[in-house]
């Protein structure tokens, strides 16, 4: 190595020594690992749902609802095993048909029990007004939470 390279290496070693970055596998004592969700900090709980989009009431302003006019592309029942056992839901897949700016991808909406009794199996290829409160990633797609405001034209 040349003299210049030696100086660069020494300067780099000194800068690393000054930063005092702990080794990635080092544990500082006392270390208490979290036992369950109760021990997690609020920031960690929020990070678990960081992909969620939510319409919030900020600064005391009246809450603005996101309502879209949507075409129901499919109306199906869905079953999966969740934390509390088998979950059965009526799922509709909708495409935004709103004027102006609209959602580019289809989204799913899980009907509530009240909506299921009224609308299950009857919305295929119909236009509905869908009030969206929250959008969450679910199985590679966005799933909306909210309510069916009504059918368009009725």
Image: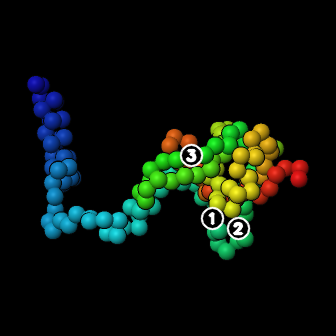
Q: Nearer the viewer, residue 141 or 102?
A: 141
Residue that label 2 marks: 63
* Picture quadrant where residue 40 is located: bottom left
Return the residue at label 1: 56
Distance in Å between CA atoms under marks 1 and 2: 7 Å
What is the CA distance from the residue labelled 3 to the residue labelled 1? 29 Å
Can see residue 108? no
Q: In this view, does 41 lie to the left or right of 27?
A: right
Query: Residue 126 location in percent, x, y?
Result: 79, 43
Separation of marks 3 and 2 at Cα, in angstroms: 32 Å
Residue depicted at x 19% and y 40%? 12
Q: Is residue 112 visible?
A: yes
Residue sitting at x 59%, y 49%? 143
Marks 1,2: beta carbons within 8 A: yes
Q: Which color scheme does this rendered protein use?
A: rainbow
Above or below, 89 against 33 in this view is above
Nearer mark to the viewer, of 3 and 1? 3
Find the residue positioned furthest to the top. 1
Query: 69 above or below 41?
Result: above
Seen from the viewer's position, the closer of residues 143 and 78 is: 78
Tag 1 or tag 3, which sits nearer the N-term?
A: 1
Q: Judge whether 66 appears above or below 126 on screen.
A: below
Tag on residue 78? 3
- Quarter of the image where the N terminus is located: top left
Tags 3 and 2 touching, CB below 8 Å: no
Residue 16 lies left or right of residue 116; in this view the side is left
């Amino acid at each position: 190595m040349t003299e210049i390279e030696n100086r660069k290496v020494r300067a780099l070693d000194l800068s690393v020594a000054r930063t005092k970055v702990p080794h990635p596998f080092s544990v500082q004592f006392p270390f208490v690992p979290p036992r369950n969700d109760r021990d997690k900090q609020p920031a960690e709980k929020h990070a678990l749902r960081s992909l969620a989009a939510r319409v919030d009431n900020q600064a005391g302003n009246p809450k603005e609802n996101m309502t879209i006019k949507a075409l129901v592309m499919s109306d199906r029942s869905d079953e999966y095993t969740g934390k509390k056992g088998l979950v059965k839901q009526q799922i509709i897949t909708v495409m935004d048909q709103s004027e102006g700016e609209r959602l580019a991808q289809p989204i799913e909406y899980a009907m509530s029990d009240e909506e299921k009794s009224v609308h299950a199996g009857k919305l295929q290829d119909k236009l509905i007004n869908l009030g969206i409160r929250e959008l969450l990633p679910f199985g590679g797609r966005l799933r909306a939470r909210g309510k069916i405001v009504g059918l368009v034209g009725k």
